[in-house]
């Protein structure tokens, strides 16, 4: 076998290894980013959930409160939909 075939094989193996390492790094970065987004949403929903639960227990809420909660949920939904796309 010609020595150039051996060089090509080594180059191929090294390239595959490099691609796998980069892919693993990007997976880790994406995982961190998704975890941050999830925590942000959970933190934003926590006060709304507490208010809803408290008002549900007492069966005491106004149209204004319902509108405020709906607005806040719509805002959160828009934030999630507009979150930067990773490519």
Image (tube, grey):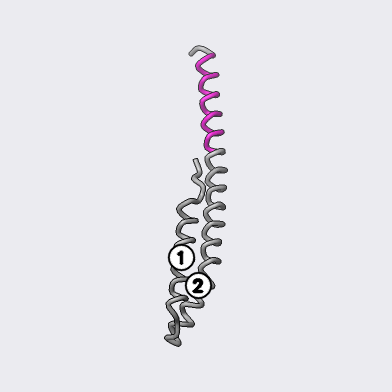
> Mark 1 sits on what residue?
73
Q: How many marks?
A: 2
Residues packed near mark 1 inside 10 Å, few (<14), some (14 to 19) or many (20 plus):
some
Q: CA distance from mark 1 to mark 2?
A: 9 Å
Residue 14 located within the stretch drawn in magenta: yes
Q: Position of residue 35 (x, y in %)?
A: 54, 57
Nearest to the observer: residue 49 or residue 59 = 59
- Marks 1,2: beta carbons within 8 A: yes
Query: In screen coordinates, is 14 left or right of 61?
Result: right
Residue at 53 percent across and 34 percent down: it is 19
Element marked by disc 2: helix
Query: In screen coordinates, is 3 left or right of 63?
Result: right
Q: Position of residue 9 (x, y in %)?
A: 51, 22
Residue at 49 percent across and 45 percent down: it is 85
Residues shaded magenta: 4-20
Magenta stretch, overall SS: helix
Residue reaching furthest front?
A: 64
Residue at 46 percent across and 82 percent down: it is 55
Of mark 1 and mark 2, the one earlier in the sequence is 2
Element marked by disc 1: helix
Image: 73 above or below 29:
below
> Mark 2 sits on what residue?
48
Nearest to the observer: residue 27 or residue 18 = 27
Query: In screen coordinates, is 11 left or right of 53?
Result: right
């Amino acid at each position: 076998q010609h020595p150039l075939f051996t060089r090509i094989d080594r180059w191929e193996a090294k390239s595959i290894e490099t691609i796998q390492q980069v892919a693993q790094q990007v997976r880790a970065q994406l995982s961190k980013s998704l975890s941050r987004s999830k925590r942000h949403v959970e933190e934003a929903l926590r006060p709304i959930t507490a208010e809803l639960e408290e008002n549900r227990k007492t069966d005491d809420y106004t149209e204004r409160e319902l509108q405020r909660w709906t607005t806040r949920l719509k805002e959160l939904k828009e934030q999630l939909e507009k979150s930067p796309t990773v490519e």
